[in-house]
Image (cartoon, rainbow, N blue to C red):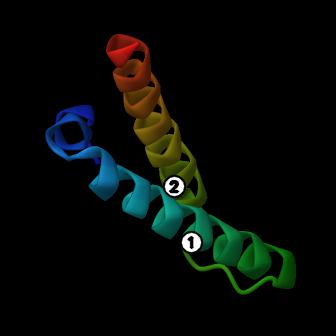
Amino acid sequence: MKSSDVRAKTDDELKAELGQLAKEGFNLRFQQASGQMENTARVRQVRRDIARIKTVLGERTRKAS
């Protein structure tokens, strides 16, 4: 996910995406602990996508204040 894609979405869409990514991260941690993980790079992608979304949401709240 690119930052331009994140900025194009509304706050509600970003919050929904954030919840979905958090669940995926949780599942990936379980897969890693049990040795069932196939794509280890996905953990890094999920973490970075979460950070991108949180950054954009933070910028928007600071701008609104």
Tell whether label 1 touches label 2 (CB within 8 Å). Answer: yes
The amino acid beneath tag 2 is Val
| Quadrant in which residue 35 is drawn | bottom right
Image x and y of residue 31, in percent: 73, 81
Location of mark 2 (residue)? 46
The amino acid beneath tag 1 is Glu
Image x and y of residue 15, in percent: 42, 54
Query: Which residue lies at the image location 31% right of the left edge and 45% below the top edge?
Result: 11
Image x and y of residue 28, in percent: 66, 73
- Numbered disc 2: secondary structure: helix
Answer with left or right where residue 37 lies relative to residue 33: left
Image height check: is 17 above or below 1? below
Please state which of residues 52 and 32 is positioned toward the viewer in this rendering: 52
Location of mark 1 (residue)? 24
Please state which of residues 10 and 33 is positioned toward the viewer in this rendering: 10
Residue found farthest to the right: 33
Image height check: is 34 above or below 53? below
Query: Which residue lies at the image location 42% right of the left edge and 23% below the top edge?
Result: 61
